[in-house]
Amino acid sequence: VRCAARTGQWDTACAAAVTAIIQRDRIRPELLRTLEAGATEAHAWEPLARAMTAALSQGPMQAALSQALEVTIAGWFRDRVGDLDAAEQAAQRGAAQGPTRLDTLEILAGLQRRDPSPRLIATLLKMDRLEEHSLDALFEAAKLAVEQDNPALSQQVLEQLYRKAGGMWMQGDPTTGEQKPSEIAQWALDRLIAHHIVVGNAGRAVHVLIDGTRLPLDVEKACELRRHAAEMLAERGERSRAIDVYRGVLDAKPDDREALGRVAAMCEEEGR
């Protein structure tokens, strides 16, 4: 490996390196350092990165080792060559070996942010599965899904975010990320309600409005959700259910004259 690297025979050097890795079933740091030293001396980072890509595609290798090498190649293309497309391709190949390394997915997401698309959302969702106590990746995915005007994807990701953030908030779980469960749960709740209204699914919107009152919200916010749900039910002709929901408002705020008036009017319409 050393001799081939010194003489610029990158295909030979990388093929020998991959063979050694397969035989030893591990990546020796000094092996990579030898290749990198040769590339630095000869200003040959691109030939090294492309030769290692080709060598890695030639033979079977344990998934974890292949993933680690692809991450290394991605770093070479990104930091030494400046070919971000090639870096993204390497990171994508690494992630395809199995979403078990957060650093692989973080590198891939960083490269995919150049052109946000459903692919970036998919990467962020994989990151979220590895970050049990963080909402950062899932929140970013939800914002992107909403911005990309993809109703089905928006609903899927918003529901995931609402369930996770709401659960963390109610259980008092610690968070390792920047986003706070209380803030993110309410953000997701509001967007999910708006989503169902926009797509014309009033029944689902009512369900989410009522479900949201289970969160440890302040009294005014919880009453606002109940009022909204009750009025949507009334518009659908479900006055009996609307009255029951309004009673939740009156349990929290017995002197709410607006709620009292609406309940009285609906009871009269229902003949109660």
Image: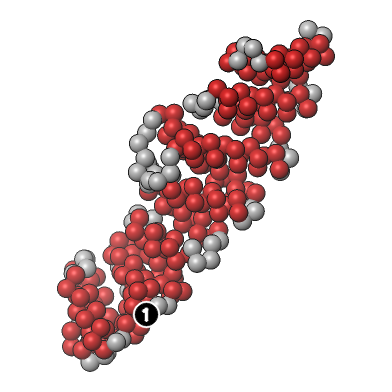
Q: SS class of the residue under badge 1? A: helix
Q: On the image, which quarter does residue 59 sit in?
A: bottom left
* Quadrant of the frame with the N terminus: bottom left
Dot 1: few (<14), some (14–19), or many (≥20) neighbours within 10 Å? Answer: some
Please indicate, yes or no, whether residue 53 appears anywhere in the rendered image.
Answer: no
Q: Is residue 23 left or right of residue 104?
A: left
**Residue at 60%, 48% in the rendered image:** 154
Q: Position of residue 215 (x, y in %)?
A: 51, 28
Q: Position of residue 71 (x, y in %)?
A: 34, 67
Nearer to us in this view, 123 or 82: 82
Nearer to us in this view, 161 or 129: 161
Residue type of the residue flagged with mark 1: Val
Q: Is residue 85 left or right of residue 143?
A: left
**Residue at 46%, 35% in the rendered image:** 182
* Residue pointed to by mark 1: 81
Q: Residue furthest top?
A: 272
Please indicate, yes or no, whether residue 272 appears anywhere in the rendered image.
Answer: yes
**Residue at 21%, 81% in the rendered image:** 37
